[in-house]
Image (tube, rainbow, N blue to C red):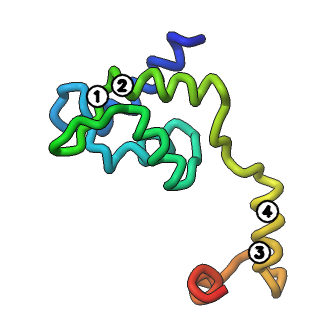
């Protein structure tokens, strides 16, 4: 199980390893984590990054530092997505006309004003 998880993490990391040197830009870490099916908020991403000993300057994270942190996150099932029924309920609350969709203008209004 651990070997499978580590393989999955390594493959996700390599997508963002632009130089093929087992490093990724620290600014990409949140994207990598989310590509693995974990959905931490930005504060939680920063908490994880702090455990990865970011190389300065340049803000690079080495795979060897990323791998154990993310393996533990996946084994502990941290940062799971919100259940589908909760998202559907939230959508239905926003779909005041019960038409099955939300207009772009309404979505912008909800996200910026309410």
Residue underneath mark 3? 100
Residue 26: x %, y % from top left: 31, 44
The residue at 77%/49% (across/down) is 83
Residue underneath mark 2? 65
Q: CA distance from mark 2 to mark 1?
A: 5 Å
The reply to whether the C-beta atoms of the residues labelled 2 and 1 are less than 8 Å apart is yes
Few, some or many residues within 10 Å of mark 1 (<14, 14–19, 20+): many
Residue underneath mark 1? 62
Residue 30: x %, y % from top left: 43, 47
**Vertically, is 91 above or below 47?**
below
> Viewed as shown, does residue 14 lie left or right of 48?
left
| Disc 3 versus disc 2: nearer the observer | 2
> Which badge, 1 or 3, is on the more N-terminal residue?
1
Residue underneath mark 4? 88
**Dividing the image into 4 quarters, which one contains the N terminus?**
top right
The residue at 52%/23% (across/down) is 71
The reply to whether the C-beta atoms of the residues labelled 3 and 2 are less than 8 Å apart is no
> Viewed as shown, does residue 45 lie left or right of 21?
right
């Amino acid at each position: 199980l651990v070997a499978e998880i580590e393989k999955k993490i390594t493959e996700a990391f390599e997508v963002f390893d632009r130089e093929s040197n087992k490093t990724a830009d620290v600014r990409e870490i949140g994207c990598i984590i989310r590509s693995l099916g974990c959905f931490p908020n930005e504060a939680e991403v920063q908490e994880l990054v702090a455990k990865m000993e970011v190389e300065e300057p340049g803000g690079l994270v080495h795979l060897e530092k990323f791998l154990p942190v993310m393996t533990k996150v996946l084994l502990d099932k941290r940062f799971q997505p919100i259940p589908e029924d909760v998202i559907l309920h939230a959508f239905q609350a926003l779909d005041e006309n019960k038409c099955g969709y939300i207009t772009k203008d309404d979505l912008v209004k909800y996200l910026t004003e309410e």
